[in-house]
Image: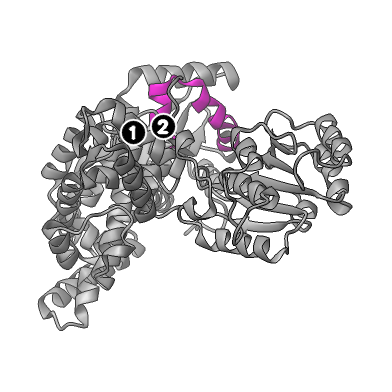
Amino acid sequence: MSYQALYRVWRPQRFEDVAGQEAVTKTLRNALSQGNTSHAYLFSGPRGTGKTSAAKIFAKAMNCPHSENGEPCNECDICESITLGNLNDVIEIDAASNNGVEEIRDIREKANYAPTQAEYKVYIIDEVHMLSIGAFNALLKTLEEPPANVVFILATTEPHKIPLTIISRTQRFDFRRISPQDIIRRMTYILNEKEVDYEEDALLAIAKAAEGGMRDALSILDQALSFSNGLITLEETLRITGSITQELLSDYVSAALVNDTEKGLALLHAILQEGKDANRLVDDTIMFCRDILIYSKTQEETVLKMSKVDEQFKQLSAEADPEKIYEIIRVMNQTHQEMRLSSHAEVYLEVATVRLTQPVMSKAAPVVSEGKGDGQELSIMKDKMQQMQKMIEQMQQGGQNQSAPKPAAQSRKPKKQQTFKVNKTQVFRILEKATKEDLVKLKDVWPDLIDYLPAGQKAIMKTSKPVAASPNGLVVTFDYDILCERAQNDSFLLDSIGDYLEKVIGHRAELCTVPSEQWLTVRQSFIQRMKNSTEESEDVSTEEESAPEEDKLVSEAIGLFGKEIVQIKE
């Protein structure tokens, strides 16, 4: 006989064998023992949580002549026939491949015939959400007026796709994700029955990778059995699942907590070079941080989803700043969304690691420590606020005295200014001739332009946003400085954008990049420059180029920014 997968061999045959669904199985057993069964049921929940297995057990228990307390005997001819799939009165249908009206009409016609061997005729329709609208309508009539001794069990992973008229005519049971403890308990029983040795940490790694699905867990366990030589080890299991050891996760999170960028990047590259999945790293980091938060408040090991409580984990939970852990979760969640739209996952992980390991992340710390009486940090914050207030007042006066506080302002933000320097001359040249019509035209074609680019350039331009455009130039913002620099220095990308614009709008355009966080400052500088130009005589030139005529300058400013922003002073 050919080899059978573990999830088929060890499929539950009694309600008590269904792991992690005690509320559902108890309700079904009570209904069977009390004779209060319905004509239609809806089993919904994630994949591999026991929906179809529970449906077959329910069908056996309804028709078993020797059932006790709602459990089938699994020894009579009826039970054995249902287990083997040979009983004509229990029909399993895959709605993914039988989703038409004709198939449901055939079921409706055959349902009118009495069962031949069993007491009840049971239809188990798997993935019922795949039925067409016409098929649902055909099924609705049968559910409204069901024939005698006919029971429908509908199973689905997406109940929101089922019409409410169908749901309202069924008894609904929601199957939840199976906890790691229940998965480990079931795998332990199977391995003991097969007399296979294992490491407990290996089973925990499998339970984490299964994400609440027993079928997935048994499939991974099957791979581990084939890969091992009589002993299932943690190292081999991690190789199969692509997961990361808890020790590496602890070191990575610790590097973020102590702002050690070099160590964080080194750990990231080591993890990726081992062939670990980038998405798995993000998911594991989020779940590990979740466990740190929960354990630091409850000190309960049973509430953890993926972590093992050892000395390193206890120390990390005791010393970790909750606000920093929240920030790690937020950044990793954002990175996960960005990675889904890009083929360069490593770049986003590097950016996320740098963000998490920068001291600038703790800027809110002085405000928190104010209530604790930290006078030194409060004094620093007050000085910084005063300097910012002075700078704002000087900017409002026309920028004439801006040179005085400038060194202090630059000393406060050295890191942001050193990463990417905006070419203001190029930006101002584009803004002087920019119009709303050109910007609207460019925004209309921008999504198509990004799709036109090759994969490498598309990944760079995914977060780009056009903010200004002239007949021969455009200004584009990016979320990260590193993407600004890459786009500005990529000659192939610039040529590709120019070629596309020439085909679509009839002319090429000079591309200028600006980080999103600097765009408002650059635009304000341009507005201030225009205001100063209108106050000077026509023969005064700026440092970069001669000023246009006043009327032309004013009209262009109003066309670009609107009358509310531009003020003309005599």
User: Which label number is shown at residue 345?
Assistant: 1
Q: Which residues are magenta?
A: 439-464
Q: Quadrant of residue 114?
A: top right
Q: Nearer the viewer, residue 68 or 58?
A: 68
Relative side of 125 to 456, left or right: right
What's the coloring here? one colour
Dot 1, how many residues are within 10 Å of its Cα: few (below 14), some (14-19), or many (20+)?
A: some
Magenta residues, dominant SS class: helix
User: Which label number is shown at residue 393?
Assistant: none
Q: Which residue in the protein does label 2 denote?
A: 342
Q: State the SS at label 1.
A: helix
Q: Is residue 450 magenta?
A: yes
Residue 101 locus on image (x, y percent):
83, 33
Dot 2, how many residues are within 10 Å of its Cα: few (below 14), some (14-19), or many (20+)?
A: some
Q: Are marks 2 and 1 in contact (CB under 8 Å)?
A: yes
Q: Nearer the viewer, residue 157 or 250?
A: 157
Type of residue at label 2?
A: Ser
Q: Nearer the viewer, residue 323 or 247?
A: 247
> Residue at 17% of width from left, 77% of height from top?
378
Residue 236 locus on image (x, y percent):
22, 32
In space, the residues marked 2 and 1 are separated at their CA atoms by: 7 Å
